[in-house]
């Protein structure tokens, strides 16, 4: 598909989304209309491009509840790769969680609903492209010394990095993370920009309650990852391999989806 055709296609998707947003359309109706647009253009689903377009559209000029509902519906109906959406959101929402506390909570809600359904996300026709995109977004290969981008390896890296980010964000929110010590500094971009912090009234009672609830929810999610049968196995595998050849997990694709 030529570049101008692609540009026109995604402009149409954005226009449809804007109109649905203004009308307060049912998310199901929006998903049907957008699926029809993509189908007519020969775009196969789930679409990595749609995932990027929707997350970019929401963050941050259009951060409103109905668009999060549209995004959720796209994930439910496999219009977008859920794991890719979560990776995209983590890179944008976690560093902005104090500036956008409601978005952080919605991100964690999506994480709770979709991060524990890995089997269905391994078998997409374009899964190799999806996994490479996740690897690039989270910089997993460089962070963990990955030598392969197979599905099992990236799933392990995705789960481990997600839990790691939630832990560091929670520690930072409680003032327990040291940013000045290079050895203790978080690997992830979890510290909000100063301009974003200054934009908030840090003494605002409603804001502080929401931030406190978000920290509690993040800890609950971490616990869920540790207790879930599949993700706990994945985290144990990651831990075991960190001490020898970090994430040298060539044969784990089948194991990860058992």
Image: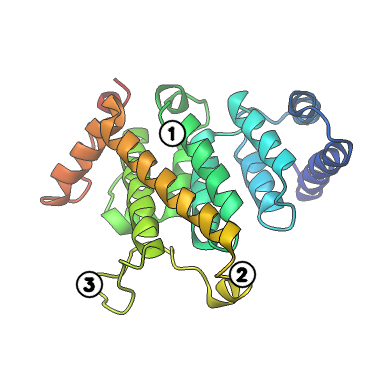
Q: Which residue lies at the image location 55% right of the left edge and 34% below the top edge?
A: 81
Image-quadrant location for residue 225: top left
**Residue bearing mark 3:** 183
- Mark 3 or 2, nearer chain start: 3
201 vs 120, nearest the viewer: 201
Q: Residues within 10 Å of mark 3 (few under 14, many from 20)?
A: few
Q: Which residue lies at the image location 68% right of the left edge and 46% below the top edge?
A: 53
- Mark 1 or 2, nearer chain start: 1
Q: Position of residue 226 (x, y in %)?
A: 27, 36
The residue mark sitting in front, 3 or 2, is: 2
Quadrant where the image shows the N terminus: top right
Q: Position of residue 108 (x, y in %)?
A: 49, 42
Q: Which residue lies at the image location 34% right of the left edge and 46% below the top edge?
A: 163
The reply to whether residue 47 is visible in this rendering is yes
> Is 87 rendered above or below residue 139?
above
Alpha carbons under labels 3 and 1: distance apart: 29 Å
**Marks 3 and 1: CB-CB under 8 Å?**
no
The residue mark sitting in front, 1 or 2, is: 2
What mark, if any, has residue 115 been given in the picture?
A: 1
**Residue bearing mark 2:** 200
Quick check: 237 left or right of 110? left
What secondary structure is found at the residue carrying circle 2?
Answer: loop
Quick check: 24 left or right of 31? right
């Amino acid at each position: 598909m030529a570049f101008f055709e692609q540009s026109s296609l995604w402009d149409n998707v954005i226009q449809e989304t804007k109109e649905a947003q203004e009308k307060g359309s049912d998310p199901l109706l929006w998903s049907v209309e957008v699926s029809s647009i993509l189908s007519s253009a020969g775009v196969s689903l789930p679409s990595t491009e749609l995932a990027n377009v929707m997350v970019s559209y929401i963050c941050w000029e259009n951060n409103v509840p109905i668009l999060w509902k549209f995004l959720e519906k796209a994930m439910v109906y496999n219009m977008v790769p859920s794991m890719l959406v979560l990776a995209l959101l983590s890179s944008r929402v976690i560093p902005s969680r104090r500036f956008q506390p409601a978005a952080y909570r919605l991100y964690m809600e999506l994480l709770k609903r979709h991060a524990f359904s890995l089997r269905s996300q391994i078998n997409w026709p374009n899964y190799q492209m999806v996994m490479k995109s996740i690897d690039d977004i989270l910089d997993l290969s460089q962070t963990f010394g990955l030598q392969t981008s197979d599905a099992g390896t990236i799933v392990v890296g995705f789960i481990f990095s997600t839990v790691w980010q939630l832990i560091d964000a929670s520690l930072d929110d409680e003032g327990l993370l040291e940013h000045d010590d290079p050895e203790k500094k978080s690997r992830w971009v979890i510290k909000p920009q100063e301009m974003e912090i200054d934009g908030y009234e840090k003494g605002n009672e409603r804001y502080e309650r929401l931030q406190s609830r978000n920290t509690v929810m993040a800890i609950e999610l971490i616990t869920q990852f540790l207790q879930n049968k599949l993700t706990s196995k994945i985290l144990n595998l990651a831990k075991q391999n960190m001490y020898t050849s970090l994430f040298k997990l060539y044969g784990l694709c089948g194991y990860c989806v058992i």
